[in-house]
């Protein structure tokens, strides 16, 4: 155990014990005093804003999610907003998901904001991330907060902070907010006096404003009406999606939306799934089972805060298979750009956005339609940044990331599973009108643009030593980068921390203009791309592997070839 860290943790713990905290919390800390490792893990550092804001295991301590950390985060946010935006209206929006303690954390957040003189718009019940982002913009708020830990296990909760544009805070704002939080040395500095008159509740009438924007996105309303009886199965995975998704699909004109009732009840314990993550097959098992029973065409699943969507479609053997985030984004982007082209909406100043770890297939599709594409760092807040920077200059069409996030239209500035569900449903009806399934549409894209296959390998390093292990792994990859991957020479290394791109053969170095981020990319001669980065929200180091090939006779043949290549790449990286 690191004694320096323990002493720091002990000092913080003693400060908490001597402060005005509740009896149960004080008792828990006193018990930790006899367990140095547990105490250190709970107190040695503060939760910080990463790519997804605050996120951590619920419990007592500065490194845990609890009402006191929420109070400090909110007071720090208040201090920063008052200093940095003194002329902006003092209005904020607050929402929360179905996780344990989310309602309490949201009320705590609202109370601190209100005590600091802010007008607070607090949703009267659970609502998803995209509606919170929409509310910030619609109500001209200076900031917003969403209490959620997205798809993390039930032990977690989190705190996403938003700026006036409806996007999550980016640098330097996120760092400055952390600094303001760190500057709070006692709970006495937190304003908690009740000012209930400053808190206003948003109810179903506000949902109507959001529905209006989502439904306006439809590109083929007549096709939707023609295939209104197409069967879909939807599961909110015990989360916020139940509030909006079934209703908006109904209003879209779809009459055969079957809900997985066992998962329709909001529940922070997520009793029917191992993890409420729509990326994982196990989370969709009940929905797929129901889809088989009723012979549905498509399965839709949203995570607890309904900003990400997972889908399952029928393949050539009539079996349900999960599409990954890259595949879903590719289908949606291809459909949307095709419709924009056919409807003469592409005028020359349009663009789409993707993250640097998202499939290059999107770039290929954008080039085909002569639409500009921006690459940004991982995190949807960077997509929001591009939208903000180009307001009034260029027209945003859509943006996506490999981790199942997608956004059409710019009235929201975070990933939006509600509108993604409506767009996926629309594309499914469009495919059916052409005698296709979504799977067949995906294969058509592969045949036209090339077969792109991606894989994500996540290695978890828990505990206080985990961070150091991850740092050492990144250090090793920087000092000893791979020379070959699956037999192909590495020709370009991009280091987003050093902000430089190096050509191995010519030794030429180009600057990278994106913000500093601890990310490495290795690009080979055959256009394989491997990205390595520590997670911003979990104790993990992630390896994103992207390969491509021309279409070879069948899906199975091409897929097997690329899968074999990926296995070799994992061996070369030492991560298999």
Image (tube, rainbow, N blue to C red):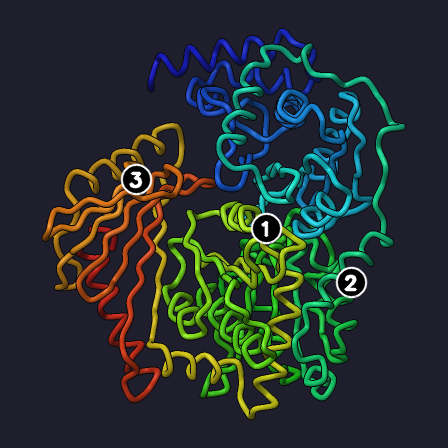
- How dense is the environment of label 1, judged by Cα within 10 Å: few (below 14), some, or many (20 and up)? few
Choose top left, top right, bottom left or bottom right for residue 185: top right
Q: Earlier in the sequence, mark 3 or mark 1?
A: 1
Judge whether 53 appears above or below 576 on screen: above
Q: Can you say whether 252 is above or below 454 in the image?
A: below
Residue 307 in picture, x, y percent from top left = 61, 54
Q: Quadrant of residue 284?
A: bottom right
> Residue 563: x, y in percent?
28, 70
Q: CA distance from mark 1 to mark 2?
A: 21 Å
| Label ID, residue 391 | 1
The earlier-in-sequence mark between 1 and 2 is 2
Residue that mark 3 sits on: 499
Q: Residue at x 64, y 77 (%)?
A: 426
Q: Mark 3 or mark 1, which is nearer to you?
A: 1
The residue under label 2 is 212
Residue located at (73% from left, 68% from top): 215
Q: Residues within 10 Å of mark 3 (few under 14, many from 20)?
A: some
Point out residue 80 in the picture as x, y percentages from the top left corner: 62, 23
Position of 533 with respect to 162 (left or right) is: left
Quadrant including the N terminus: top left
Name the residue at the bottom extreme.
435
Residue in the image at 64% along x and 75% along y: 425
């Amino acid at each position: 155990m690191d004694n320096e860290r323990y002493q720091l943790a002990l000092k913080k713990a003693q400060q908490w014990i001597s402060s005005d905290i509740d009896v149960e919390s004080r008792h828990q800390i006193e018990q930790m005093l006899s367990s140095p490792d547990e105490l250190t893990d709970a107190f040695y550092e503060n939760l910080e804003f990463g790519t997804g804001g605050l996120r951590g295991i619920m419990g007592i301590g500065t490194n845990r999610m609890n009402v006191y950390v929420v109070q400090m985060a909110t007071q720090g946010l208040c201090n920063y907003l008052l200093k940095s935006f003194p002329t902006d209206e003092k209005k904020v929006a607050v929402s929360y998901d179905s996780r344990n303690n989310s309602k309490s954390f949201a009320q705590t957040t609202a109370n601190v904001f209100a005590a600091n003189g802010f007008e607070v718009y607090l949703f009267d019940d659970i609502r998803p991330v995209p509606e919170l982002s929409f509310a910030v913009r619609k109500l001209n708020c200076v900031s917003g907060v969403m209490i959620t830990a997205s798809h993390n296990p039930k032990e977690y909760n989190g705190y996403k902070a938003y700026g006036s544009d409806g996007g999550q805070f980016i640098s330097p704002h996120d760092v400055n907010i952390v600094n303001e939080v760190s500057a709070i040395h006692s709970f006495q500095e937190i304003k908690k006096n009740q000012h209930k008159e400053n808190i206003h509740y948003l109810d179903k009438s506000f949902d109507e404003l959001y529905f209006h924007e989502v439904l306006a996105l439809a590109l083929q309303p007549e096709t939707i009406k023609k295939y209104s009886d197409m069967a879909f199965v939807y599961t909110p995975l015990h989360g916020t999606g139940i509030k909006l998704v079934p209703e908006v699909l109904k209003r879209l004109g779809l009459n055969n939306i079957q809900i997985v009732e066992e998962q329709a009840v909001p529940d922070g314990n997520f009793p029917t799934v191992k993890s409420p993550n729509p990326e994982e097959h196990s989370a969709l098992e009940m929905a797929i089972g129901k889809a088989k029973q009723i012979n549905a065409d498509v399965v839709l699943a949203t995570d607890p805060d309904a900003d990400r969507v997972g889908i399952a479609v029928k393949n050539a053997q009539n079996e349900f298979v999960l599409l990954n985030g890259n595949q879903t984004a590719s289908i949606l982007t291809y459909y949307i750009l095709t419709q924009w082209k056919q409807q003469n909406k592409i005028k020359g100043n349009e663009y789409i956005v993707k993250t640097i770890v998202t499939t290059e297939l999107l770039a290929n599709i954008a080039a085909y339609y002569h639409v500009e594409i921006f690459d940004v760092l991982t995190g949807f807040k960077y997509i929001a940044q591009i939208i903000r920077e180009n307001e009034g200059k260029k027209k945003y069409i859509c943006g996506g990331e490999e981790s199942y996030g997608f956004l059409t239209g710019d009235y929201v500035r975070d990933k939006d599973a509600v509108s993604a569900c409506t767009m996926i449903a629309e594309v499914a009806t469009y495919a059916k009108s052409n005698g296709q399934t979504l799977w067949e549409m995906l294969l058509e894209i592969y045949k036209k643009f090339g077969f792109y296959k991606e894989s994500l390998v996540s290695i978890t390093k828990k505990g206080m030593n985990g961070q150091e292990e991850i740092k050492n792994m990144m250090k090793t990859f920087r000092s000893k980068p791979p020379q070959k991957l699956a037999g192909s020479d590495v020709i370009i290394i991009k280091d987003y921390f050093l902000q430089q791109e190096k050509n191995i053969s010519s030794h030429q170095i180009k600057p990278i203009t994106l913000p500093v981020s601890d990310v490495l990319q290795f690009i080979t001669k055959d256009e394989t791309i491997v990205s390595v980065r520590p997670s911003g929200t979990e104790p993990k180091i992630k390896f994103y592997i992207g390969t491509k090939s021309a279409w070879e006779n069948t899906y199975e043949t091409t897929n097997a070839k690329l899968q074999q290549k990926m296995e070799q790449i994992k061996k070369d990286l030492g991560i298999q």
